[in-house]
Image: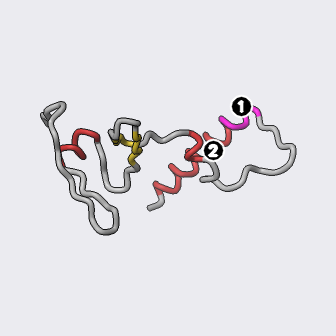
């Protein structure tokens, strides 16, 4: 899709503070439903909006709390566990 750089696109703010992002802008920025956007304000009154990149810290806690105790796992043990999980998942897919 061809978007003119520096072209102005208008959106509208609702009574709830929500705004509609024009389709051309969504397409250009690769915004999909649920995408977080980051607003940056400067001292000149300019607001910049860009898609928020997923950072490692954003994933913290997604898998639950870290295991407690003094458990150490080697790279080889991790590789083996991953391989076992792949084989198990593949075997389950064959049974469907």
Give the residue at the far right of this rendering.
70
- Per the rendered image, the range of residues in magenta is 74-79
Image point (65%, 35%), residue name = 79
> What x and y, as percent, mark residue 28?
23, 39
Question: In which quadrant is the N terminus drawn?
Answer: top left
The residues bearing labels 1 and 2 have C-alpha atoms spaced at a distance of 12 Å
Q: Is residue 37 magenta?
A: no
- For disc 2, the marked residue is 84
Relative to 94, is 8 on the left or the right?
left
Q: Residues within 10 Å of mark 2 (few under 14, many from 20)?
A: few
Q: Nearer the viewer, mark 1 or mark 2?
A: 1
Q: Residues within 10 Å of mark 1 (few under 14, many from 20)?
A: few
Q: How many marks?
A: 2
Instruction: Inspect this view and state whether residue 1 appears.
Output: yes
> What x and y, as percent, mark residue 96?
44, 62
User: Which numbered disc covers residue 56?
Assistant: none
Query: Image quarter for residue 15?
Result: bottom left
Earlier along the polypeptide chain: callout 1 or callout 2?
1
Image point (28%, 40%), residue name = 29
Give the residue at the far front of this rendering.
44
Q: Secondary structure at mark 1?
A: helix
Image point (27%, 65%), residue name = 14
> What x and y, as percent, mark residue 30?
29, 42
Q: Secondary structure at mark 2?
A: helix
Q: Nearer the viewer, residue 54 or 89?
A: 54
Image point (71%, 31%), residue name = 75
- For disc 1, the marked residue is 76
* Prevailing secondary structure of the magenta residues: helix
Q: Nearer the viewer, residue 63 or 55?
A: 55
Q: Is residue 28 above or below residue 94?
A: above
Q: Nearer the viewer, residue 86 or 38?
A: 38
């Amino acid at each position: 899709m061809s978007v003119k750089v520096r072209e102005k696109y208008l959106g509208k703010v609702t009574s709830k503070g929500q705004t509609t992002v024009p389709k051309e802008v969504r397409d250009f920025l690769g915004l999909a439903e649920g995408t977080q956007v980051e607003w940056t304000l400067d001292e000149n009154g300019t607001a910049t909006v860009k898609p928020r990149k997923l950072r490692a810290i954003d994933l913290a806690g997604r898998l639950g709390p870290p295991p407690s105790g003094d458990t150490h796992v080697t790279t080889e043990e991790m590789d083996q566990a991953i391989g076992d999980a792949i084989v198990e998942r593949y075997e389950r897919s064959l049974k469907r």
